[in-house]
Image (cartoon, rainbow, N blue to C red):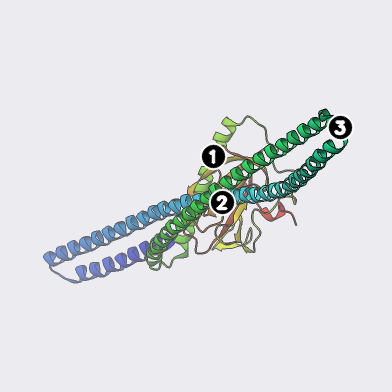
Amino acid sequence: MRDMIIHLNHTIRASALCTGALLCLMFSQPSVATSKNQLDGVKQEISRQQNQLGSKKTQFNTLQKELRQQELGIAQTAKKIHQADSQLNTLNDSISKLERDQTTLQQLKFGQQEMLKELLDTQYRQGQNDQLASLLSGKQSTELDRMSVYAERLSQARSRALNELAATNTELQLKHHELALQRQQQQVLLTQLKTEKSTLESKQKHRKKTLISIKSQINSDNNYLTELHANEKRLLAEIAKAKAEAEAARRVPMDGLARQQGKLPWPVKGSVLHAYGSVQKGELHWKGMVFSKPSGSQVKAVYSGKVVFADWLRGYGLMLAIDHGKGDMSFYGYNQTLLKKVGDTVQASEAIALVGDSGGQERSGLYFEIRRKGTPTNPRNWLAK
């Protein structure tokens, strides 16, 4: 946008010079017809350049819209990948638990088999001895029958326990197999999603190159400042809208950040690219902080609150805003994808987004800002040392 506006100024200056030159030629010639022809030429040239500027401005705005759509597409895919990864981790945990349970059951089965083997051996030897004793001593058959029935019932009980254990073990094996298949399906899904994400990122890079080629024509810092101011106005407008909606929908009071100065967890752990108050361009200074962090890293909420904005915003990309109550809000921009939506309640250190480079940023990172009653404040003073 900066380059576009600068190019407009250069073209208008060129048009003015051209106009001046042609007017000089017009008044230097005595012929009225010649002067009229020159004036018509000037008008045509101005009209041509205005049409050209209008066309380039339209093209630039179209590129911004396409960039937004591509980044939203990447965000959707990245969110699916994040969800698939979580599902895969859950499956891995389930498989590990099943394997531990299976090992325990196998050990129990082995113990029971040994007990059953010993019992059968004892019963066999007892049966041999009892038969011989009954023949030699003439003992009553009642006692022998009682012992035989006891041994038989005990053997049956052990056999049933063993059968039940075998059935349980078979069931666990089936579950393990089922989870293994699900895990394989998840891997296939991840591959597909990552391929889709790569395709979208490729399209985004291509579009950014086109955007850069247009911006390369611009040299004026004033016009870049105009775009930055416009970005901030868009943010302020969204803040006002979001805050009004939050106040109207609020049911649970929130305590704000007043008691949290110097205690808040960092939204990401990374080096600071731009500090609060440092020069952004000309007289414009950063009203937040920019952290360097690889794409896909988790962004954490610094304090509990309610999500009041979660959308793509020109200049900030995928932005999420949290209302903490009493006029305190925190903002998280440049994200690859958002994990929360408007109306969601979040807790401190809860994952709310993934780091990215949306909004046309040249490198991945997180834009973080804190505002109190609409006024930006230095976020570093609120973060833990």
For the residues carrying marks 3 and 1, which lies nearer the camera in this image? 3
Residue located beneath label 1 in the image: 342
Tell me if mark 3 has few (under 14), some (14-19) or many (20+) residues whose alpha carbon lies within 10 angstroms of its own.
few
Ranked by sequence position, the earlier of labels 3 and 2 is 2
Q: Which numbered circle lies on residue 139? A: 3
Tell me the distance, in whole angstroms, between the alpha carbons under discs 3 and 2. Answer: 69 Å
The location of residue 343, given as percent across then percent down, is: 56, 37
User: Which residue is at 31% across, 65% downward?
Assistant: 16
For the residues carrying marks 3 and 2, which lies nearer the camera in this image? 3
Residue located beneath label 2 in the image: 88
Furthest residue toward right? 137
Q: Secondary structure at mark 2?
A: helix
Tell me the distance, in whole angstroms, between the alpha carbons under discs 3 and 1. Answer: 88 Å
Give the quadrant of residue 242. top right
Closer to the camera in the image, 238 or 317: 317
The location of residue 309, given as percent across then percent down, is: 54, 42
Whether residue 154 sits left or right of residue 208 in the image: it is: right
Q: Secondary structure at mark 1?
A: loop
User: Which quadrant: the C terminus?
Assistant: bottom right
- What amino acid does circle 3 point to? Lys
